[in-house]
Image: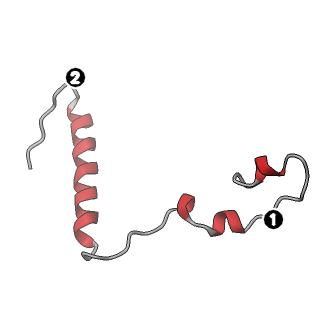
Amino acid sequence: MNIKVLRGNPTPEELAAALAVVRARAAAAAATPPGAPEPRDGWSDPSRIAAHRLPQPGPATWARTYWPG
């Protein structure tokens, strides 16, 4: 694995931190079996919106139909 710094002058500690992140991401990608579904995050979970009560009818209901709360 070759890493090339294109801009700036990072310290050895900064390079080590960046390399640790790249290696951790590569190890995580290699650990998941191919074809396995990716885990859902909270933003894409439909139950996040469905868990809240529905807006009551009224003149400003259209503004509250997408954003919960």
Q: CA distance from mark 2 to mark 1?
A: 51 Å
Coordinates of residue 16 in the picture (x, y in percent): 22, 42
Q: Residues within 10 Å of mark 2 (few under 14, many from 20)?
A: few
Q: Is residue 68 left or right of residue 41?
A: right
Among all residues in the image, which is located at the extreme top? 8
**Total number of numbered discs in the rendering:** 2
Q: Is residue 58 left or right of residue 53?
A: right
- The answer to which image quadrant residue 44 occupies is bottom right
Q: Secondary structure at mark 1?
A: loop
Foreground of the two, 22 or 45? 45
Foreground of the two, 11 or 6? 6
Tell me the tag on residue 8. Answer: 2
Q: Identity of the amino acid at label 2?
A: Gly
Q: Secondary structure at mark 2?
A: loop
Mark 2 touching mark 1, by CB under 8 A? no
* Residue at figure coordinates x 78%, y 50% from the top left: 62
- The answer to which image quadrant residue 45 occupies is bottom right
- The answer to which image quadrant residue 48 occupies is bottom right
Tell me the tag on residue 37. Answer: none
Tell me the tag on residue 53. Answer: 1
Among all residues in the image, which is located at the extreme left? 2
Among all residues in the image, which is located at the extreme right? 58
Coordinates of residue 3 in the picture (x, y in percent): 12, 41
* Residue at figure coordinates x 25%, y 36% from the top left: 13
Q: Identity of the amino acid at label 1?
A: Arg
- Circle nearer the N terminus (2, 1): 2
Q: Is residue 26 left or right of residue 48?
A: left
Q: Residues within 10 Å of mark 1 (few under 14, many from 20)?
A: few
* Residue at figure coordinates x 26%, y 42% from the top left: 18
